[in-house]
Amino acid sequence: MARTLTKSNEQWRRAVTRLPLGVASNFRYWGAERTIYVKHGRGARITDIDDNVYVDYRLGYGPAILGYADPRVDAAARAGMEVGGVFALSTEREFRVAERISKMVPAAELVRFSNSGTEAVMAGLRLARAYTGRDDYIMLEGSYHGLFDAAMWYTPMEKWGQVGEPEVQPYSQGIPLGARGFAHFVQANDANQLEETFKRQAGKVACMLLEPIMGNCLGIAAEPDYLRAARALCDKYGAVLLIDEVKTGFRVARGGVQELCGIKADLCTFAKAVANGYPISILAGREDIMRKLGQGVAHGGTYTAHSVSLAAAEACLEILDETDALEKIAAYGTRLRKGMTAVLNARGIPHSFVGHPSMSGLYFAADPPRNYRAWKSSDYAFYDAMAQVLHDEGVLCEPDSREPWFVSAAHDDSCLADTLRGFEIAVDATLRSRIAEKVPA
Ligand SMILES: Cc1ncc(COP(=O)(O)O)c(C=O)c1O
């Protein structure tokens, strides 16, 4: 497909005069020549301002679970606007939505709303610290919990030499280095290391912040046994288990990873799939912990439970709970994996899939990774080169191999056919460019 980005390029040159990097979020900048400006999204497709149409597997990093501009959710949101916006007072709908969430997620005994995933996790960590009277927390290498200072430590694996421990670095300038000591990193799926960490930090760990399918790390999943071990160790060492289901919630199952693995968090957070793209997030959990909100622990916000987002959440959660949307999403994801495998096997390219069919990581090594360090030994350069061609062919995945492919209920047979056609072209083009560059396959 011949793709031109003339208008997007012009727009970028204009936008950069007023907006840092020419965008509203750093992650949306893909370079002066490749940054895309969207005209609209409908169903599973996005049209950019040059009228290029893409089958989209980013879905805004997950929210558009029913597809863009779902008429049922948009109608509910319009009706929500009629309520009047925000009042700094409560409405009856809050209880109805909280009831639905508690029905879908047994761990959600009590519920509070916020606007973004970041806000919900930040509130959860504060609550866990208040509840336990401790300050430290444990995170998985490769996990992402949003852009607040306490969560902005990471192990940049691309810089790791595959020996020794990867260095923990701040994710940004402006993070006070003095706060570093509170965060302890462990590798996913290593219960022994987790127990050692709890022991080493005896009595100091308030919380394990656990992203059960790491949505910024291919979709590497915590295995059910590991989740059970994490549950038991949090109980043993008196720490709160906060399962961050911002990406997995209401996507991999009605009750998220907790349902899939039969595990109950003390606190859990949700955001992306809650309202099909309208900004709302959820902090929920055990009654004795949640009751501390308002009993010494602050929580609130001007836009919390905005009438538009709340009405959209009510409609979206009803659809996810009462229709077969999630089953359709998983079935499409499975067909997508099969189609990709057929293309890759025909060319002898070792690969595997990670995560869940509704948010699949494509990994270029035969055995799926169990932790972030394993990603380093995959052929991620192949993925990154292939992604550029996929964009030119009208298939929008994240340009970085670490982001999974999100599927919506609007992905249909025609999307699948277009995707697999583009995928075949992109794989072959990447193989050809490797031969031309004499990169060992
Ligand atoms: C697991 C997880 N937690 C928290 C966040 C932060 O959410 P938001 O971008 O809505 O602030 C994200 C965002 O990708 C996420 O994937």
Image: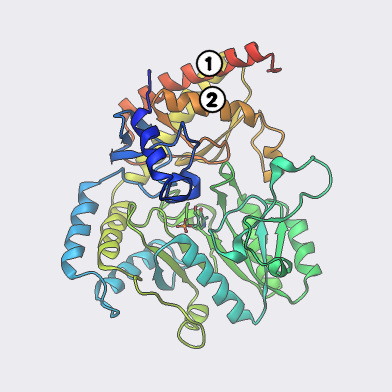
Q: Residue at x 71, y 73 (%)?
A: 237
Q: Residue at x 78, y 74 (%)?
A: 202
Report the quarter where the N terminus lies. Answer: top left
Q: Using the rendered image of the protein, determine whether residue 371 is visible from the camera's viewpoint.
A: no
From the viewer's side, name the closer residue of 348 and 261: 348
Note whether 350 is above or below 435 in the view shown: below
Residues under numbered marks 1 and 2 in contact, where contact means CB atoms less than 8 Å apart: yes
Disc ID at residue 386:
2
Residue at the far right in the pictured view: 164
Residue at the far front in the pictured view: 17
**x and y percent of residue 195 in the render?**
76, 63
Query: Does 193 sit left or right of 208 as displayed?
Result: right
Query: Does 179 sit left or right of 260 as displayed?
Result: right
CA gap, disc 1 and disc 2: 8 Å
- Helix, strand or loop under label 2: helix
**x and y percent of residue 204 in the render?**
73, 75
Q: Which residue is mark 1?
A: 429
- The amino acid pointed to by label 1 is Ala
From the viewer's side, name the closer residue of 373 and 155: 155
Q: Using the rendered image of the protein, determine whether residue 291 is visible from the camera's viewpoint.
A: yes
Q: Residue at x 65, y 60 (%)?
A: 139
Q: Residue at x 61, y 27 (%)?
A: 351
From the viewer's side, name the closer residue of 266 and 347: 347
Q: Earlier in the sequence, mark 1 or mark 2?
A: 2
- Helix, strand or loop under label 1: helix
Query: Does 394 sit left or right of 267 as displayed?
Result: left
Note whether 107 is above or below 319 in the view shown: below
**x and y percent of residue 432 in the render?**
58, 12
